[in-house]
Image (cartoon, grey):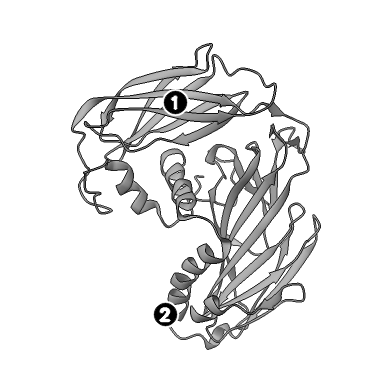
C-alpha cells in the first residue's frame, strides 16, 4: 500500500511550484500553469561536509520540476569537481535537486525560474555514510491532540538530531535490513499517516511499529506521524514511548471541555497558548524506551464541530510552540509533493 503524506500545506505548495516570479499561483484544482518556454539551466555544485570525506565525483544527480500536475525529471552525473549542468528545464518552474552520495539522497530546493531568470546555481551539501551508530537523540518531540466525540487524532513532530559528521545508515533488524528510526505507536492506533523525513521507499508499519530505513543525516531532521485513537466510554488512554533519548516533550490540546492528564507531562502556563484556546504540557529528558501515559476524558461532552475548530487552531499552535520557521515547514511540504506524492499506511506496509 502507499503512504499518505501528512502536511496540510500541499495544495499551496502545488500552486507555488507551478508558478515562477511574476506568475500567479493557481488555486488547488484549477487549470495548470503552462510553461512559457523551455531552456532553464541549473548548475549543480556539491559541497562535501564530512571533513576528509570522499569526493562525490560520479554521483547521480536528479533535477525535478513540477509541470502542471506532472513531475518532469532530468538526470546527470557529477564531474570530478563535483559539478553537473542540467539544461532544457521547462519554464516557469522551481527545481528540486537531489544528489545521491554513498547511497544517501541529499536535496536542495532552487529558486523560482522563468524566462527572465532562466539560469541558476544550486548548492547541495553531502556527507559520507557510516554504519556506526552516533549518539543521536530526539531534540524535541511535539504532540498535538485533536479531540472528537469518537476519539483523538494525535499528530507528532520529532526533531531528530545526529551530532556526527556522517550520515548513519542504520543497524540491521530481524529481517537483515538496516533500520534507523523505530516508533512504537500506541495500542489501537489507526489511519496512520507520515510526513517530513519519512520516505515512501523506506518506511514500514508492522505490528504497531513504524520503521524508517532511510539514513539519518547530520544535524536536525523532522519526522512527522499522525494517527487516530478510538474513544471508549468518552475517554482515550495511551502511551508515548521514547524511540531514543528525548530531551524535551511538549503536548498541546485545545481547551475544549475535555480533560487531559499525565503523570509525566506537567501543565505549562503560557499566555499566548491560552489566548488561542490551547493547553500546553511539558516534560524534560526521557530515556530511550521509557513511556509517558496520557489520559483524555470527557470526549462525549464535546459539541459538534468543536473538534474541527480545535484542530485548525492547533495547527497554528503547533508551529508557534515548536518554533519551526515557516520556510522549513514549507520546504518539507515541497519535498513531499515532489518525492512522495500520495501515501497511505495500511496494516501491511511491505505490500508495494
Marks 1,2: beta carbons within 8 A? no
**Residue at x 51%, y 62% (from the top left corner):** 319
Residue 184 appears anywhere in the view: no
| In this view, the mark in front (1 or 2) | 1
Task: Please tell me which residue lies in front, 68 or 125.
Answer: 125
Q: Is residue 23 left or right of residue 60?
A: left
Residue 293 appears anywhere in the view: yes
**Residue count near mark 1 (Cα–Cα under 10 Å), binned few <14, some 14–19, many ≥20:** some
Q: Which quadrant of the figure has residue 258? A: bottom right
**Residue at x 77%, y 61% (from the top left corner):** 285
Q: Is residue 164 left or right of residue 223?
A: right
Name which of mark 1 and mark 2 comes first in the sequence: 1
Query: Marks 1 and 2, how far apart in space?
Result: 45 Å
Label at residue 305: 2
Regarding mark 2 in the picture, which secondary structure is present there?
A: loop
Residue 123 on image: x %, y %? 48, 29
Label at residue 62: 1
Residue 282 on image: x %, y %? 69, 70
Instruction: Determine whether 193 is above or below 281 in the image.
Output: above
Regarding mark 1 in the picture, which secondary structure is present there?
A: strand
**Residue count near mark 2 (Cα–Cα under 10 Å), binned few <14, some 14–19, many ≥20:** few
Q: Residue furthest top?
A: 80
**Residue at x 54%, y 76% (from the top left corner):** 273
**Residue at x 35%, y 34% (from the top left corner):** 65
Amino acid at each position: 500500500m502507499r503512504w499518505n503524506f501528512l502536511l496540510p500545506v500541499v495544495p499551496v505548495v502545488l500552486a507555488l511550484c507551478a508558478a515562477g516570479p511574476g506568475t500567479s499561483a493557481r488555486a488547488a484544482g484549477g487549470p495548470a500553469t503552462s510553461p512559457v518556454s523551455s531552456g532553464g539551466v541549473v548548475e549543480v555544485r556539491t559541497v562535501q561536509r564530512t571533513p576528509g570525506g570522499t569526493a562525490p565525483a560520479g554521483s547521480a544527480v536528479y533535477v525535478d520540476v513540477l509541470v502542471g500536475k506532472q513531475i518532469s525529471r532530468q538526470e546527470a552525473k557529477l564531474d570530478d569537481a563535483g559539478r553537473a549542468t542540467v539544461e532544457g528545464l521547462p519554464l516557469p518552474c522551481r527545481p528540486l535537486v537531489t544528489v545521491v552520495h554513498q547511497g544517501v539522497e541529499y536535496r536542495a530546493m532552487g529558486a523560482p525560474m522563468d524566462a527572465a531568470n532562466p539560469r541558476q546555481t544550486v548548492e547541495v551539501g553531502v556527507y559520507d555514510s557510516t554504519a556506526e551508530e552516533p549518539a543521536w537523540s530526539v531534540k524535541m518531540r511535539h504532540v498535538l491532540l485533536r479531540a472528537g466525540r469518537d476519539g483523538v487524532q494525535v499528530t507528532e513532530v520529532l526533531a531528530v538530531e545526529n551530532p556526527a559528521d556522517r550520515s548513519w545508515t542504520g543497524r540491521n533488524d530481524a529481517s537483515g535490513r538496516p533500520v534507523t528510526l523505530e516508533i512504537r505507536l500506541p495500542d489501537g492506533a489507526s489511519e496512520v499517516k507520515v510526513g517530513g523525513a519519512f520516505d515512501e521507499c523506506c518506511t514500514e508499519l508492522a505490528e504497531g511499529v513504524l520503521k524508517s530505513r532511510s539514513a539519518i543525516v547530520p544535524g536536525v531532521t523532522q519526522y512527522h506521524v499522525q494517527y487516530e485513537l478510538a474513544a471508549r466510554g468518552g475517554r482515550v488512554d495511551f502511551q508515548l514511548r521514547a524511540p531514543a533519548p528525548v530531551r524535551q516533550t511538549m503536548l498541546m490540546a485545545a481547551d475544549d471541555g475535555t480533560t487531559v492528564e499525565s503523570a509525566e507531562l506537567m501543565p505549562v502556563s503560557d499566555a499566548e497558548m491560552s489566548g488561542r484556546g490551547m493547553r500546553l504540557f511539558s516534560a524534560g529528558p526521557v530515556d530511550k524506551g521509557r513511556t509517558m501515559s496520557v489520559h483524555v476524558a470527557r470526549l462525549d461532552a464535546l459539541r459538534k464541530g468543536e473538534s474541527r475548530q480545535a484542530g485548525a487552531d492547533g495547527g497554528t499552535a503547533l508551529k508557534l510552540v515548536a518554533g519551526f520557521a515557516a520556510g522549513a515547514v514549507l520546504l518539507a511540504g515541497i519535498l513531499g509533493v515532489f518525492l512522495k506524492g500520495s501515501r497511505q499506511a495500511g496494516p501491511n506496509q511491505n505490500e508495494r
